């Protein structure tokens, strides 16, 4: 059982960006969709293409990202997409426009007269919703693959977090491999005593209880380790004055371009929505014609 | 067991916040390797019991940081990206049970264990409600999907795990703390 970070050093534009730039840019895109409530495909599509471009520029190997993408696609397409298609809820009320042509009806429970009409409007809404979610997901997915785990603490410190919070983040990333190793040792030790984790028998409660021989030793050992670390930090007067950090992040011109782009996208979405009334949900004519002729 | 100051944020909270986060990340990841049986979309994360235990034992700051950072690490390790609202929800799940830290004296006493499980359940409800409802803004889902598709399964799964494992963790911790003398 090996624990490995997904991060690999790659010589790409995305990895040369300051991690703070990546976080702020992603926040700008999420806020650009959420605050002015953008549902217009003319805005969603370019942003989706931008996210896809940035994702491809990260050059993450398919074998690394395959499982994560599969999970997210299932979540986005089945849960969110089908919900949009069937209920049409979760967005503006115009999705449920009664004048929208009905493509077909789905008899969910015919005995209760629960028959769901699938309209052109609902189909377009499901597509828009999938587009919005994928835009955000494509920005989030590359983060663990492309940001060095050793600089999360520094990044959050330089984004304004206190020394203590930043140090907690830094320490958590350092503790992780240690506890993963402890868990591996515990698993091996329990197996040597006849513990069969692959064949946990009994009901649900019994199965969860049987995880205790793995969880308890690792957790209790970690609390003992914690006391030793606290002593060591107290002896070095941790928390009595401002700290300096070994790694210092500096914005490069490319970071300013990306930050400028992110902020511009956010402001543009707000201005388009509230200044010009562009950004609301509507079904384009070409889509209606394509479906109903 | 601790200095009983609920909102103190010193070296102890920094270290145990980091340890709680790392453990939450490790156990979340390990559950993927040894999956528990699940019904529908209910998933069981034993890591939640560890998170609530850290809140109960070391206070709200530790619970908050452990959940916030631990969920981010768990997502990072599995490669799922960064979903801030679920990380904040996990943080709330650890922070709320931490509010009773100062009132717990004997981790082996049944009333105190029941109190911890009760506050842990409240933390689960508040944390998962926050995460599910904010998904309406970030994911564009409706209230019905947020409550039925996300909130209810998460609360059921997390409650079962907490009710079973938290008492075991508390009793084990009482023994360790007694031996350690602090």
Image (cartoon, coloured by chain):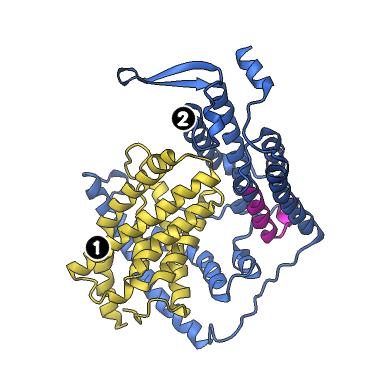
Chain colours: A blue, B yellow
Is residue B169 visible in the rendered structure shown here? yes
Crowding at dot 1, Cα within 10 Å, few <14 / some 14-19 / many 20+, comes out as many
Task: Identify the residue position indicated by label 1 in the image.
Answer: B167
Q: Position of residue A61 (x, y in %)?
A: 64, 43
Seen as rendered, the residue at the extreme right is A253
Residue at 48% across / 61% down in the picture? B68
Q: Is A258 placed left or right of B146 in the picture?
A: right
Q: Position of residue A244 (x, y in %)?
A: 65, 79
Dot 2: element: loop
- Please report, as a chain letter, where disc 1 is located: B
Magenta segment range? A13-30
Principal secondary structure, stretch drawn in magenta: helix
Which labelled disc corresponds to residue A87?
A: 2
Q: Nearer the viewer, residue B3 or A123?
A: A123
Is residue A29 one of those drawn in magenta?
yes
Residue at 53% across / 46% down in the picture? B137
Seen as rendered, the residue at the extreme left is B110
Q: Position of residue B78 (x, y in %)?
A: 51, 49
């Amino acid at each position: 059982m090996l624990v490995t970070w997904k991060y690999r050093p790659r010589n790409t534009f995305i990895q040369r960006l300051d991690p703070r730039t990546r976080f702020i840019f992603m926040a700008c895109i999420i806020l650009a969709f959420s605050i002015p409530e953008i549902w217009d495909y003319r805005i969603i599509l370019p942003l989706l293409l931008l996210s896809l471009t940035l994702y491809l520029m990260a050059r993450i190997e398919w074998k690394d990202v395959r499982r994560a993408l599969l999970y997210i696609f299932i979540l986005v397409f089945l849960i969110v997409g089908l919900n949009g298609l069937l209920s049409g809820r979760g967005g503006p009320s115009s999705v449920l426009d009664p004048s929208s042509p009905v493509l077909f009806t789905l008899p969910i429970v015919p005995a209760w007269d629960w028959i769901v009409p699938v309209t052109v409007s609902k189909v377009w809404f499901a597509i828009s919703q999938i587009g919005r979610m994928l835009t955000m997901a494509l920005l989030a997915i590359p983060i663990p693959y492309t940001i060095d785990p050793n600089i999360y603490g520094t990044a959050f410190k330089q984004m304004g977090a206190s020394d203590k919070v930043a140090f907690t983040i830094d320490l958590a990333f350092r503790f992780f491999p240690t506890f993963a190793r402890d868990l591996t040792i515990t698993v091996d030790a329990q197996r040597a005593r006849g513990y069969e984790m692959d064949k946990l028998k009994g009901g649900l409660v019994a199965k969860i209880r049987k995880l205790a021989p793995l969880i308890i030793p690792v957790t209790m050992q970690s609390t003992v380790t914690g006391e030793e670390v606290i002593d060591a930090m107290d002896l070095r007067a941790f928390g009595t004055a401002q700290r300096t950090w070994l790694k210092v992040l500096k914005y490069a011109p490319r970071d300013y371009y990306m930050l400028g782009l992110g902020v511009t996208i956010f402001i543009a979405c707000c201005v388009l929505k509230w200044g010009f009334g562009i950004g609301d949900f509507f079904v384009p004519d070409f889509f209606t014609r394509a479906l109903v002729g | 067991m601790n200095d009983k100051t609920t909102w103190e944020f010193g070296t102890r909270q920094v270290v145990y916040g980091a340890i709680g986060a790392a453990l939450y990340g490790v156990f979340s990841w390990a559950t993927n390797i040894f999956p528990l049986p699940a019904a529908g979309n209910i998933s069981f994360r034993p890591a939640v019991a560890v998170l609530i235990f850290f809140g109960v034992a070391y206070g709200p700051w530790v619970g908050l940081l452990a959940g916030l950072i631990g969920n981010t690490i768990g997502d990072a390790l599995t490669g799922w990206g960064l979903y801030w609202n679920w990380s904040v929800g996990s943080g709330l799940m650890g922070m709320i049970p931490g509010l009773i830290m100062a009132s717990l004296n004997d981790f082996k006493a049944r009333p105190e264990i029941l109190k911890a499980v009760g506050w842990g359940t409240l933390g689960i409800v508040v944390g998962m409600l926050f995460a599910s409802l904010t998904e309406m803004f970030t994911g564009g889902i409706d209230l019905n999907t947020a409550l039925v598709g996300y909130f209810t399964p998460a609360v059921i799964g997390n409650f079962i795990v907490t009710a079973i494992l938290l008492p075991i963790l508390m009793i084990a911790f009482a023994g360790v703390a007694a031996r350690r003398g602090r």
